[in-house]
Image: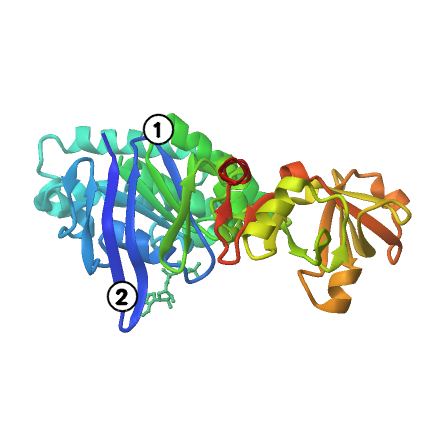
Amino acid sequence: MAEVALSNIHKSFGQTEVLKGIDLTISHGEFVALLGPSGCGKTTLLRIIAGLEAPDTGSISIGGRDVTGLDPSDRNIALVFQSYALYPHKTVFENIAFPLRMRAPWFARIPVLSRALPQRRRLEQALQTKVRDAAAQVGIGAYLDRKPAQLSGGQRQRVALTRAMVREPAAFLMDEPLSNLDAKLRSGMRIEIKELQRRLDATIIYVTHDQTEAMTMADRVVLLHEGVVQQIGAPMSLYQNPCNRFVAQFIGSPSINMLLLEAAGANQFTVNGAVIETVPADLRQIARSHGGRLWLGVRPEHVALVPEHASGIPGRVALIEPLGHETLIDVSVLGAADIGTGPDRIVVRAAPDAVDTVRAGAAVRLQPDWQQALAFDEQGRRIAIRAAMAAA
Ligand code: ATP
């Protein structure tokens, strides 16, 4: 079983603490995405698992074996990078065969000696079969005689993947492997890698800053921020049940809308600066118990755009983005822009035909679905609304 376990990993470069105590266990056959903004420590963590970087403290085990002090070559892992790292002078076949040839005993790697080996023909045939089978699985069987320069970016990345596959490693470590490809090819390769992983029952640790990649491919997402794991979970659980404001705002595109609910008198509340009567009693009560201020996260699909004469947060349509399957409407909140309290933009996810009925510059009202709101305190910690009410 190729379980990968990290315990209390710390890493600093000079004065900068890049990883601040990472604990993570990845099961055999699991696809885990390390996700987070640039500089959060994803690549450093992957390099530590690979053995290319040593942790300051902590341990790494792969398949139940402590590999913390071992060289990368002794860890039985395969790395796939954004730069394909193919040998330009070797053919595709020889690039894929390279790790298998390197695995042979030293005397078998010297042509003069290897020719004298009795089992040479059988070994070469087995290698040929393995390389051709793997290449066929990844759809590059027709290019085995070409050099990397004669391939497209997507084909080169397939060669790099195939070279990793033939090694039959305990785990695949991938660092932004698709980021050199154009959007269409990237989405095709996402599906291919996922299918390949299922077929091979492979353990994959995949670094990306692209939440779509993480959400669509991973069984579990590990969201990092400033060297600290913010949340680990199935993609939808991070979307629906974020543990803090950072996770809520990082996961989801367009990003979750943040509304600031503030007590503005004995019984009056404002949302992003506008007096709103419809805020439910439970949210008002939680706001009061948090010094009169409560941050509410509302996803764009949970905000309705209504005519100006209806009740709701007043705003003006700033931008309409027709995307075919939906229309995104960016509304500038009047109260917030004037008074400077709370975020002044709210994005609404509307039906495709909204593009025919909504006009840029129009005065509108916004009605958040308060039942779907996520509450956060000033420090960005999630407040479980039901639990807060039960305790009140
Ligand atoms: P990106 O998505 O931009 O690749 P990342 O999350 O993978 O970012 P890392 O590459 O792990 O981030 O880097 C984390 C931090 O550590 C960054 O601030 C980076 O500048 C710093 N860092 C990484 N490697 C070194 C190094 N060898 N020496 C000094 N600082 C380093």
92 in relation to 340, above or below:
above
Q: Quadrant of the N terminus?
A: top left
Find residue 14 and report its horizontal and vertical position in percent: 26, 73
Look at 33% across and 54% down and name the residue there.
87
For the residue pair 166 and 104, the one nearer the viewer reads as 166
The amino acid on which the numbered mark 2 sits, given as a three-letter code, is Ser
The amino acid on which the numbered mark 1 sits, given as a three-letter code, is Leu
Which quadrant of the frame does ligand 1 lie within? Answer: bottom left
**For residue 233, which quarter of the picture?**
top left
Mark yes or no: residue 36 visible: yes
Judge: label 1 CB < 8 Å from ligand 1. no
Crowding at label 2, few (<14), some or many (≥20) Cα neighbours within 10 Å? Answer: some
Find residue 361 and report its horizontal and vertical position in percent: 87, 58
**For residue 298, which quarter of the picture?**
top right
**Helix, strand or loop under label 2:** strand
For the residue pair 175 and 182, the one nearer the viewer reads as 175
Q: In terms of sequence position, does the residue under pointer 2 or pointer 1 come before the other?
A: 2
For the residue pair 350 and 137, the one nearer the viewer reads as 350
**Helix, strand or loop under label 1:** helix
Image side of residue 325 versus residue 130, left or right:
right
Judge: label 2 CB < 8 Å from ligand 1. no
Q: How many marks?
A: 2
Crowding at label 1, few (<14), some or many (≥20) Cα neighbours within 10 Å? Answer: few
Farthest residue, direction front: 266
Mark yes or no: residue 152 visible: no
Find residue 7 and report its horizontal and vertical position in percent: 23, 47
On the image, numbered disc 2 is attached to which residue?
A: 12
On the image, numbered disc 1 is attached to which residue?
A: 200
Image side of residue 332 versus residue 382, left or right:
right
